[in-house]
Image: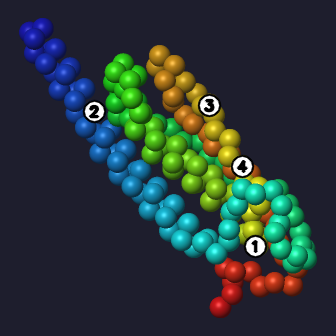
């Protein structure tokens, strides 16, 4: 009887891991699709890391633009990361998490200043805001900030026809 309960426990564990893998993969793919569509719509507005303008156009306004996101890792990726922590190597299961978080934070920053012509001096800050089991990453937060510059007497690139 104990063998049946033990086997049943393993079957449930494997089913939950499979469900976590499938649902996590689907949700990640949906998020990447959303990110790619929104990035394509905002390609005409550059986000740059340099600190000063390189042209002489008159500036109408310069304001702080901020975007932040907190993304949690799913249990399947946390399970895989446990093996990587034991054996060493790149934690690929967290690479996509950080990539999505960075890109989403930049998109939210852009959305916070929709009339800007340029985002100057863009910076990213990343932190773990919660810990999972055995101090593994549970949730990561990324904050993107830059100076949103709007030039005087210029048609906005996204509204130009």
Instruction: Label 4, secondary structure: give it.
Output: strand
- Gap between marks 2 and 4, in whole Å? 38 Å
The numbered disc on residue 129 is 3
Q: First in sequence: mark 2 or mark 1?
A: 2
Kindly identify the residue that appears in the image at 68 percent across and 62 percent down.
Answer: 47
Choose mark 1 or mark 3, whichever is in front. Answer: 1
Q: Which mark is residue 117?
A: 1
Name of the residue lying farthest toward the front? 54
Q: Earlier in the sequence, mark 1 or mark 4?
A: 1
Mark 1 and mark 4 residues within 8 Å of each other at the beta carbon: no
Q: Earlier in the sequence, mark 1 or mark 3?
A: 1
Crowdedness near tag 4: few (<14), some (14–19) or many (≥20) residues, C-alpha within 10 Å:
some
Residue 87 location, quadrant: top left
Tell me whether the residue at label 2 lies in contact with that at label 4, contact meaning CB atoms closer than 8 angstroms.
Answer: no
**Against 82, is 27 above or below?**
below
Cα separation, mark 4 vs mark 3, equals 19 Å
Q: Nearer the viewer, mark 2 or mark 4?
A: 4
Task: Name which residue lies at 15% across and 15% down.
Answer: 5
User: For the residue labelled by badge 2, is the local secondary structure a helix, a strand or a loop?
Assistant: helix
Distance between the alpha carbons at the discs numbered 1 and 4: 17 Å
Name the residue tied to disc 2. Answer: 16
Residue behind mark 4: 123
From the image, state whether disc 2 or disc 1 is nearer to you.
1
């Amino acid at each position: 009887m104990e063998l049946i309960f033990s086997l049943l426990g393993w079957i449930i564990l494997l089913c939950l891991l499979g469900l976590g893998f499938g649902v996590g993969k689907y949700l990640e793919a949906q998020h990447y699709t959303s990110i790619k569509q929104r990035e394509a719509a905002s390609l005409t507005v550059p986000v740059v890391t340099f600190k000063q303008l390189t042209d002489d156009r008159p500036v109408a306004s310069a304001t702080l633009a901020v975007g932040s996101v907190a993304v949690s890792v799913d249990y399947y990726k946390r399970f895989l990361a446990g093996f990587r922590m034991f054996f060493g190597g790149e934690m690929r299961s967290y690479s996509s998490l950080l990539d999505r978080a960075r890109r989403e934070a930049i998109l939210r920053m852009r959305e916070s200043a929709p009339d800007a012509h340029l985002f100057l001096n863009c910076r990213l800050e990343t932190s773990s805001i919660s810990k999972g089991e055995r101090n593994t990453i549970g949730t990561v937060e990324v904050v993107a900030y830059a100076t949103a510059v709007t030039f005087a007497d210029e048609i906005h690139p996204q509204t130009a026809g």
